């Protein structure tokens, strides 16, 4: 992030302004990724008119960075009409897409409309792995062709690599591919539960040994020796810090108008079909609750040695049952990074341990000068 954007974000936080927002235009998709957390059926998406009205409300509220995502955004026939409206309101536009539907005409319009960046998910440099994840044969080839073409049009492309057990060994290959194509590269070793609360897809997460190897890879995390030292305990500043930008300077809107703190934090705070965007942002009791959270208030986390260095996501914690509780996925990442288990992992280990066996020895019980049956001695 540039110094200017950081300064704008800090000012937005002081003023209580929603600096950035993600708007999912549809949950429909032409890929069926095995790890996707969305229901791909259409349950009544916002109309073109509703979205245009929402964009005006968001601009008036102060939103600057606007990310269009899905599902697959290019499945909406009105996508460019929506994009043109957004640019007329001077949003800084970022797109998330699999790029399978992007051709020369679409790429030229994205360039002419001044889109800031296009993020495309690439799961492996090997077609058999990537296509198995998307469940669409030839999807890797088509996404790579689109990346090449977008780059030729002068657009900034970011290749996003979600890591899971099935592609964990391929991140070096994806990074090399990004360098070859002139694209930026990001990776994320976290699978998100389904938005309806179904946690079964978490079985796709990479295992402990794979995460440990990743966090000791100097190509991605710098000097590996720093991860062998115990993390410092949280200081006063850390204990009073905000968990993340969700609900503070950022928010997420679903295709059906549901307003959430973040796409990974499905706590409904209102619906823009029924209330103005700014009214939800300012008055939602749910958002006020989210904004009240500090590290010092979190059960377990405030006493954990990882408190000042953990990447704890309050949304993932919420999906475990308590937004003020720990996020096990982040505890596991901290453990992989340092080799030191968190308070939460220790508690889970103790809870999962089999009950301690107590050896019973029966001996005669003596009362006065008489034997009175048997008593047990542990």
Image (cartoon, rainbow, N blue to C red):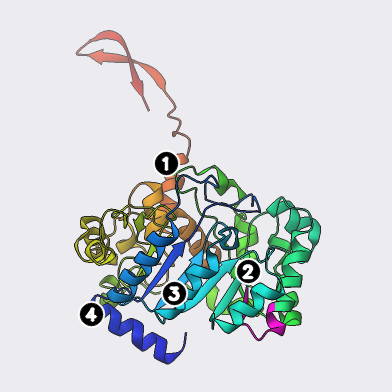
Q: Secondary structure at mark 3?
A: helix
User: In this orientation, which residue lies closer to the viewer: 148 or 205?
Assistant: 148
Q: Quadrant of residue 163?
A: bottom right
Question: In percent of the image, x 25 and y 57: which residue is there?
Answer: 275
Which class describes the residues within 10 Å of circle 3: few (<14), some (14-19), or many (20+)? many
Q: Quadrant of residue 16?
A: bottom left
Q: Earlier in the sequence, mark 1 or mark 2?
A: 2
Numbered label attached to residue 120: 2
Q: Earlier in the sequence, mark 3 or mark 2?
A: 3
| Any part of residue 343 in sight | no
Q: Secondary structure at mark 2?
A: strand
Report how far apart the C-alphas of labels 2 and 4 lie in the structure. Answer: 33 Å
| Any part of residue 309 in sight | yes
Report how far apart the C-alphas of labels 1 and 2 lie in the structure. Answer: 41 Å
Which class describes the residues within 10 Å of circle 1: few (<14), some (14-19), or many (20+)? few
Q: Which residues are magenta?
A: 150-158
Q: Earlier in the sequence, mark 2 or mark 4?
A: 4
Question: In percent of the image, x 46 and y 44: which residue is there?
Answer: 43
Numbered label attached to residue 15: 4
* Mark 3 vs 1: CB contact within 8 A: no
* Mark 3 vs 2: CB contact within 8 A: no
Numbered label attached to residue 48: none
Count all numbered tags in the image, as a single digit: 4
Nearer the viewer's eye, disc 4 or disc 3?
A: 3
- The residue wearing badge 3 is 86
Q: Position of residue 91 (x, y in %)?
A: 42, 79
Q: Secondary structure at mark 4?
A: helix
Q: Position of residue 261 (x, y in %)?
A: 35, 61
- The residue wearing badge 1 is 351
């Amino acid at each position: 992030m540039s110094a200017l954007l950081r300064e704008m974000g800090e000012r937005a936080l002081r003023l209580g302004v929603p600096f950035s927002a993600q708007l999912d235009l549809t949950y429909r998709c032409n890929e069926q990724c095995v790890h996707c957390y969305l229901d791909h059926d259409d349950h009544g998406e916002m109309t073109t008119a509703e979205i245009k009205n929402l964009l005006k409300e968001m601009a008036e509220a102060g939103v600057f960075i606007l990310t269009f995502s899905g599902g697959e955004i290019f499945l909406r026939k009105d996508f460019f009409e929506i994009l043109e409206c957004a640019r007329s309101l001077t949003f800084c536009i970022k797109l998330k897409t699999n790029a399978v539907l992007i051709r020369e005409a679409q790429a030229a319009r994205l360039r002419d409309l001044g889109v800031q960046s296009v993020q495309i998910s690439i799961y492996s440099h090997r077609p058999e792995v990537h296509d198995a994840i998307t469940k669409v044969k030839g999807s890797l080839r088509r996404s790579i062709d689109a990346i090449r073409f977008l780059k030729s049009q002068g657009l900034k492309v970011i290749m996003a690599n979600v890591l899971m057990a099935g592609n964990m060994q391929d991140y070096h290959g994806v990074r090399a591919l990004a360098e070859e194509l002139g694209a930026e590269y990001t990776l994320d070793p976290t699978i998100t539960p389904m938005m309806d609360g179904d946690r079964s897809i978490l079985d796709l997460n990479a295992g402990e040994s794979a995460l440990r190897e990743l966090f000791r890879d100097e190509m991605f995390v710098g000097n590996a020796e720093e991860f062998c030292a115990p993390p410092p305990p949280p200081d006063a500043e850390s204990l009073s810090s905000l968990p993340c930008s969700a609900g503070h300077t950022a928010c997420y809107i679903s295709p059906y108008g549901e307003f959430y703190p973040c796409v990974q934090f499905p706590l409904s705070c209102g619906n823009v079909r029924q209330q103005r965007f700014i009214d939800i942002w300012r008055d939602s009791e749910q958002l006020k609750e989210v904004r009240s959270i500090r590290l010092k208030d979190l059960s377990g986390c405030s006493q954990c040695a990882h408190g000042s260095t953990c990447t704890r996501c309050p949304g993932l914690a919420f999906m475990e049952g308590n937004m003020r509780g720990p996020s096990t996925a982040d505890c596991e990442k901290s453990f992989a990074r340092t080799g030191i288990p968190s308070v939460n992992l220790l508690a889970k280990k103790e809870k999962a341990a089999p009950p301690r066996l107590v050896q019973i020895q029966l001996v005669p019980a003596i009362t006065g000068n008489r034997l009175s049956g048997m008593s047990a001695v542990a």
